[in-house]
Amino acid sequence: MSEEDIRATRLEKVEQLKQLGMNPYAYRWESTDHAAELQENFADLANGEEVDLEVAIAGRIKLRRFMGKLAFVTLQDETGTIQLYLEKKRIEEGMADILENAFKQLDKLTDIGDIIGVKGTIKRTEKGELSVYVKQYTILTKSLLPLPDKQHGLTDVAKRYRQRYLDLIVNPEVRQTFRRRAQITAGIRRYLEQRDFLEIETPVLLSEAGGADARPFVTYHNTLEMELYLRIATELHLKRLIVGGFEKVFELGRIFRNEGISTRHNPEFTTIELYQAYADYNDMMALTEGIITNVAQEVLGTLQITYQDTAINLTPPWRRVTMHDLVKEYTGLDFNAFQTIEEAKTASKNAGLEGIDDCPTIGKLLNEAFEQKVEEKLIQPTFVIDYPVEISPLAKPHRSKVGLVERFELFIVGRETANSFSELTDPIEQRDRLEQQAARKAAGDLEAQGVDEDFITALEYGMPPTGGLGIGIDRLVMVLTDCASIRDAIAFPLLKPEKSESESPT
């Protein structure tokens, strides 16, 4: 039977329910329990034993078997599944004043996918299945479309992302991923609030994008008659709050970057950025370890996790190593030894680096070597520290290493998961670096930003020494929930319109 025929048949059942005086789209239902609670509370109930305690539960019909005067239904709610044990005599006695032939109508008018509420007692069948021994039922929502075939499930990856609601219905492990995501973000907030951090919301629409090298989304405000950007970071406004006198601030929210899409990148993503006055990047390393290990222990109950069959040990302290030392370790290139950019390029090409002809400085070339040859090999948690100044326009100069800044990135399973600076507080140097960025923007660099004059003005009033940290929530969730693709960690990832999409299952 085609989906159109199934829908037509179910619409007929909707009309039949109405004729019987039953509302196929009820207003409310009050449950006393959930499936998982019942399974846990009555785990020791013996086969054939019944508990004379009435419960009420609601959920979606996942399986149904009618056999003469008996029926068995698998009910799924948010927490799991439980069997409904239905006897014709018991049902019709329990619903005599509500619906005639109630057992027959249940068989005739319900389908897999319908949402129902039931009341009854708890019984474990002779075959050992914990069940709600139903006295009464109520059809709460009639489903018009069929769920995916039980044997084949929902295997089309693009359809899973496009119709996430269907994915959640048929794949309980997906619900678990997003439950854990919520627990992770709540745990991070709780950890910071316990340490006197204050969450303050900052604007999404900006007249000047800033805080990162990224291509912004552009929009237009009709009333103000001005072009605006969706934020690419929350950094510059959170720093304004530090200037204003707050000492510990953060925001957990959405960021928008008009960039490519892959298993590791989504143009709309979630980060947490935080700033602490009178701290530096060393303090931020300790804070990063604390945040991640705390939520891992809280949500997963362990610091020994597995990601895509690889064991990951989150036990601190994590390795701290400079970008220079890592590049030397994996490529043999010692960028501290090069005197000229030409010498560095020749050695880099001999080491297998590609696409480096346009690299203007040794610092940029060092970063290319890191990204091409090192990054994906950093599987265990690793703080990569001390970055070239050319790629870190908002970080303080390193206090003892010329040409570098006090910055780290945290890598886990070969992916950047966090980024931190000893924040630049010198307004003169900050202007110089932003003007260099603006020059790149004027030359056609789509990821470079202009000068945020108001931010420079704020710095001129004075910002205390500050440590800043950003953590990619989507990537952290990927690691802690074993998601191979970032789309598995985002409830509703952006997709092309279905009619024009040709997606590979990534």
Image (spheres, rainbow, N blue to C red):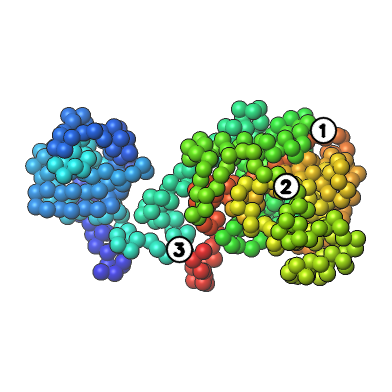
Residue picked out by circle 3: 157
Q: Amino acid at mark 1?
A: Pro
Residue picked out by circle 1: 464
How many labels were placed on the picture?
3
Residue 22 in percent (x, y) is at 22, 46
Q: Amino acid at mark 2?
A: Val
Q: Residue at x 84, y 60 (%)?
A: 362
Residue picked out by circle 2: 321
Closer mark to the observer between disc 1 and disc 2: 2
Q: Earlier in the sequence, mark 1 or mark 2?
A: 2
Q: CA distance from mark 3 to mark 2?
A: 39 Å
For mark 2, does the 10 Å Cα neighbourhood hold few (<14), some (14 to 19), or many (20 or more) residues? some
Given contact means CB atoms under 8 Å apart, are the residues at marks 1 and 3 in contact? no
Q: Residue at x 56, y 44 (%)?
A: 313
Visible residue check, residue 20: no
For mark 3, does the 10 Å Cα neighbourhood hold few (<14), some (14 to 19), or many (20 or more) residues? some
| Left or right of 469 on screen, residue 358 | right
Element marked by disc 2: strand
